Amino acid sequence: MNLARLKAIVIVIGGVLCMASYADAADLKVLTTGILKGSFNDIAVRFERETGHTLTMSWGPSSGKSPEASQVRIRNGERVDVLIMVDNGMDEVIKGGYFKPLERKDIAVSKIGVAVKKGQPWPEIGTVTALRKALLDARSIGYSEGASGTYIASVLLKKLGIADEVAPKSKVILGRRFVGEALTDGEIELGLQQISELRLEPGVDVIGPLPEELQKRSVVSAAVSSNSANVTAAKQFIDFLSSPGSKEAMIRSGLDLPAPRP
């Protein structure tokens, strides 16, 4: 067999193998909380490169009533292959019969932080007393309609005993918009949201987390939908979310890792 013929055979075989690989590739639709947005691009690039699958990502807050909220979209019948939400939000859509997971894993833990527009003075927030004063002194405050905002409005401000006092100057940032955007636009002076989400906006300074006594840790879960058209690939993706590289990306974005379930 001459060299030219051998090269032609190799090219044909390579083409057949590539076609077979593409035939097995899946396009996964992922609906995720914004908590993961800071690490998602890095994770997606590596997953697509290593598996040949592609990811189509959309995101929304894990709670709330805006059309972009994940709970609203799932209740309205939006089809996804993988759903990533704060665990109690996912529990609600499962209990309501709107979502049936074939496999579910906890992948990250998120804490709430406080931020100001870059260049603005930093108020003291390291103690309960200091945070209370910072919220009272701020001309305006903002928080999301998602998991962190629900906690701030329904628990934190009441614990601090200032819910009524700050209500007139509080703004809920709805849908896919981040609190950091409202800070940089000058709509609010002090912003509270998940730390990983605050870090997405380059125009803000994240002062730090809430004091430990007032902190709310949100566990983020990923689940394969029973309606997925690509179950095998979807399971492969949520396994990938627990890989060392994915864990490193999440930590860099401001997240912690969950403790193993007993």
Image (spheres, rainbow, N blue to C red):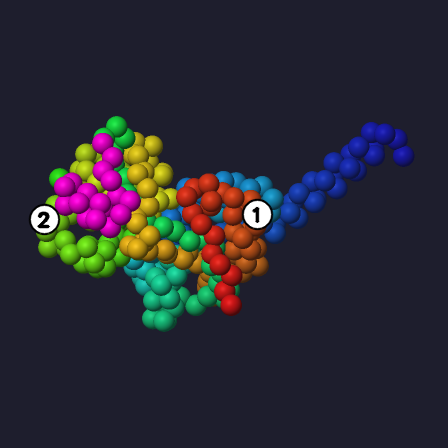
Q: Which residue is mark 1?
A: 244
Q: As shown in the figure, which amino acid type bears the numbered disc 2?
A: Pro
Picture residue at 82% right of the left edge, 29% below the top: 4
Asked if the stretch drawn in magenta spans residue 134, the answer is yes
Picture residue at 55% right of the left edge, 42% below the top: 46
Place residue 19 in its image quadrant: top right
Q: Which percent across, then down, holds residue 238?
A: 52, 55
Q: What whole-number distance in Å separates the C-alpha atoms at marks 1 and 2?
A: 45 Å
Q: Is residue 165 left or right of residue 102?
A: left
Q: Few, some or many C-alpha atoms within 10 Å of disc 1 (few <14, some 14-19, many ≥20)?
A: few
Asked if the stretch drawn in magenta spans residue 262, the answer is no
User: In the figure, 100 relative to 68: above or below?
Assistant: below
For this rendering, which residue is in front, 248 or 35? 248
Q: As shown in the figure, which amino acid type bears the numbered disc 1?
A: Pro
For this rendering, which residue is in front, 156 or 188? 156
Q: Is residue 163 left or right of residue 13?
A: left
Q: Which percent across, then down, holds residue 17?
A: 70, 45
Tell me if label 1 and label 2 are in contact, CB under 8 Å: no
Place residue 138 in its image quadrant: top left
Q: Secondary structure at mark 1?
A: helix
Who comes first in sequence, dot 1 or dot 2? 2
For this rendering, which residue is in front, 245 or 12? 245
Picture residue at 34% right of the left edge, 32% below the top: 202
Which contiguous range is marked in magenta? 121-138
Q: Secondary structure at mark 2?
A: helix
User: In the figure, 142 relative to 260: above or below?
Assistant: above
Q: Which residue is mark 2?
A: 168
Picture residue at 41% right of the left edge, 56% below the top: 220
